[in-house]
Image (cartoon, rainbow, N blue to C red):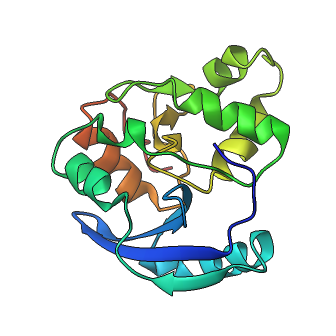
Amino acid sequence: MTSAQPETLILDRISTPIGTALVVTDEAGVLRAFNWTDYEDLMRAWLAKRYPKAALAEAVSPVRPAFEAYFAGDLDALTAVPWQGAGTAFQQKVWATLCSIPAGETWTYARLAQAIGRPTAVRAVGLANGSNPVAVVVPCHRVIGSDGSLTGYGGGLPRKRWLLSHEGAAFKERLAA
């Protein structure tokens, strides 16, 4: 991971079975942001705040093949994608730990808090998980509720459901109240 501010960011649009993904890398091919086209305005505002001096150019990203392979069924294809998330030291620790959850497995927020050595910080872990700027590569979708049900996902629960099903992970649907 690199900490230098990029001069140029590359935005690629990748068609997936669950919508068009927005993949933002720097000049070195390090993933800096990931989102979906229905959240493009929010992502652009986030990029402008975190990388105010970087120009944004649309082009094919060097990490495109890894994303295409993942969505085609190679569940380990994204593990080699270099990434850098702009966040606090606590957020960085949570995001790094998320990367240790294998495809096909899920953890609860409590288990994630325990894994970072902060067992009482479940809510803070949840907030850090939700602040993940490089979703799918840093697999925040693999965190579920304590009862095994799907909980919030920035890209929407239908996408989270698809990602977990794609990876063969177990979860249960939350019953409507």
Q: Residue at x 37, y 42 (%)?
A: 78
Q: Position of residue 113 (x, y in %)?
A: 71, 23
Q: Is residue 132 above or below residue 111?
A: below
Q: Residue at x 26, y 47 (%)?
A: 70
Does residue 27 sit above or below 81 in this rendering?
below
Residue 98 appears anywhere in the view? yes
Residue visible at 64% across and 24% down in the picture: 112
Identified at 67% across, 22% down, the residue is 110
Q: Position of residue 44 (x, y in %)?
A: 63, 81
Q: Is residue 41 visible?
A: no
Q: Is residue 64 above or below residue 10?
A: above
In-image side of 157 versus 73 (left or right): right
Q: Tell which residue pokes out farthest to the left in this image.
A: 72
- Residue 26: x and y, percent? 57, 65
User: Which quarter of the rendering shows the N terminus?
Assistant: top right
Direction from residue 37 to residue 118 in the image, left or right: right
In-image side of 18 versus 29 (left or right): left
Q: Position of residue 13 (x, y in %)?
A: 36, 76
Seen from the viewer's position, the closer of residues 24 and 7 is: 7
Q: Depth check: give the residue in front, 50 or 156.
A: 50
Report the number of discs. Answer: 0
